[in-house]
Image (cartoon, rainbow, N blue to C red):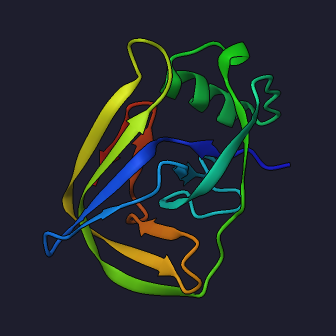
């Protein structure tokens, strides 16, 4: 079993041309913190569901990242499921701002946005079930969220 982090939901993407894509509330920002199965600088936006509130994360890097990102103890982390999106992918436009809601401790939960230093490419799965936000290889996405670009 692979551990992925759902970094947020309530996602809106502001495209370079000014158009805004608003995703369903049940979709999340899916991130492979370790880069073990997905490119670590690709964030996928796809449907997910919460399964159980008792979680046992085997990967210590993912566990550490989740606790820091949400500001909670391991016992407060939730388990969910997400279908790992695959291609083929179709380029949509470049994203200049991402808006998202984050759960977690009183100090960490809330609505967030990140203005990209330069617009990043957005792809849509050909069957329409997911999006891929393709950040550059030197991206920084950590306990604070999106940092660079």
User: Is 149 placed above or below 76 here?
Assistant: below
Q: Is residue 5 left or right of residue 147?
A: right
Residue 8 position in % (x across, y down): 47, 41
Q: Is residue 15 above or below residue 123?
A: above
Horizontal side of residue 13 vs 82, given as left or right: left
Position of the C terminus by quadrant: bottom left
x, y (%) of residue 130? 55, 69
Q: Residue at x 59, y 87 (%)?
A: 88
Residue 100's image quarter?
A: top left
Task: Name which residue lies at 13% across and 69% down.
Answer: 18
Residue 26 higher or lower than 95, as above or below: above
Q: Quadrant of residue 83?
A: bottom right
Instruction: Judge by depth and name the residue closer to the eye, 2 or 104.
Output: 104
Residue 47 percent coordinates (x, y): 60, 57
Residue 57 drawn above or below residue 104: below
Q: Camera-side residue: 95 or 34?
A: 95
Q: How many marks?
A: 0
Task: Report the residue at 40% width, 20% height from top.
Answer: 108
- Is 30 positioned to the left or the right of 50 in the image? left
Identify the residue shown where x is 56% and y is 51%.
31
In the displayed orientation, state which residue is furthest to the left: 18
Q: In the rendering, at what x and y percent does residue 135 appear?
A: 39, 64
């Amino acid at each position: 079993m692979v551990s992925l982090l759902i970094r947020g939901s309530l996602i809106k993407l502001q495209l370079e041309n000014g158009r805004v894509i608003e995703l369903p509330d049940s979709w999340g920002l899916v991130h492979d913190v370790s880069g073990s199965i997905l490119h670590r600088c690709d964030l996928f936006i796809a449907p997910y569901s919460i399964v159980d509130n008792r979680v046992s994360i085997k990967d210590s890097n993912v566990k550490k990242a989740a606790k820091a990102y949400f500001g909670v103890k391991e016992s407060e982390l939730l388990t969910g499921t997400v279908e790992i999106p695959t291609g083929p992918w179709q380029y949509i436009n470049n994203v200049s701002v991402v808006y998202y809601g984050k759960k977690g401790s009183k100090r960490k939960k809330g609505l967030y946005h990140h203005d990209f230093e330069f617009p990043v490419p957005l792809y849509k799965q050909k069957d329409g079930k997911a999006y891929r936000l393709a950040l550059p290889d030197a991206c920084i996405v950590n306990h604070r969220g999106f940092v660079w670009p």
